[in-house]
Amino acid sequence: MSAQSLAGSSRRSSSKHGTEDALLVRAIEITAWAKKNIRLVIAAVVVLAGLVAGVVYWRIYSRERMERAAAEFVQLQQTAASGNLQLAARDMEQYIRRFDGTVYAEEARIALAQLYMQQDSAAKAVEALAGAAERVDDSPLGPQAALLLAAAQQATGDNEGALATYMAVAEEADLRFRRVAALEAAAQLQSRLGNHAEAATLYRRLAEMADEGTPERQMYEMRLVEEEARAQAGNGGS
């Protein structure tokens, strides 16, 4: 073996032993520190174990709560289907309080508002869906809840609130058909309120969302022309 090869082998061996020695020294230092600070080490281990146990417990609790919510939601639907609307409404109110924060509670809240609307209690429907306009993009049910809230607001005579809720859906809903439904409802309400210029703006937006040459776009363009004409007539034809 050449002198150069022997020198290279010696350097590698020396480097290896140096690394091992450094690791050994570091391990000794850590062990000494741990012995000196044993109470701190024990406290840290206890805290870590508590955090891990807490996470595991929360996951189990959340899963079990979701399973209970699903099972009881089926019973809730059966009560609603029985035709006893007052009993169904009471059970839904209790269910929402117990399982608030789950997707099933959101479904129950929508169903409860629909029951109230069937009973001509739009004010209660508004109360049941309070805050839905701010939760449009929180869940897949958000836009549906907000659209129902807007309809209930409109039924109570709160047209300004209804328009604001419709526009929240139009701006924040993920699905196009939800945005279209909100814009259509807002445009129709603006027209009924005599706000034809505002209605025309919404129909123009709907026309731009529709594909060129489709019956849908032609309808929106026709409504746009009608609302512009009404707005101009309202301004004295100027």
Image (cartoon, rainbow, N blue to C red):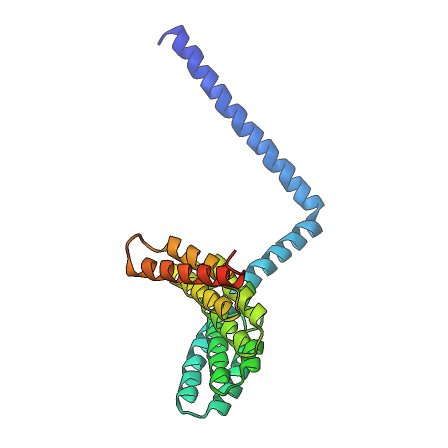
From the viewer's perspective, is residue 49 above or below residue 61? above
**Who is closer to the viewer here, 67 or 148?**
148
Q: How many marks?
A: 0
Q: Is residue 142 visible from the viewing direction of this image? A: no
Residue extending farthest top: 3
Q: Is residue 225 left or right of residue 47?
A: left
Residue extending farthest front: 237
Spot occupied by residue 13 in the image (x, y as percentages of width and height): 46, 20
Spot occupied by residue 116 in the image (x, y as percentages of width and height): 51, 84
Spot occupied by residue 2 in the image (x, y as percentages of width and height): 37, 7
Quadrant (top left/top right/bottom left/bottom right) for the N terminus = top left
Q: Which residue is found at the position 46% from the left and 85% from the top? A: 118
Spot occupied by residue 108 in the image (x, y as percentages of width and height): 48, 78
**Who is closer to the viewer here, 137 or 54?**
137
Q: Which residue is found at the position 45% from the left and 59% from the top? A: 228
Q: Is residue 235 visible from the viewing direction of this image? A: yes
Q: Is residue 131 left or right of residue 143?
A: right
Q: Is residue 125 left or right of residue 45?
A: left
From the viewer's perspective, is residue 39 above or below residue 158? above
Q: Which residue is found at the position 49% from the left and 57% from the top? A: 171
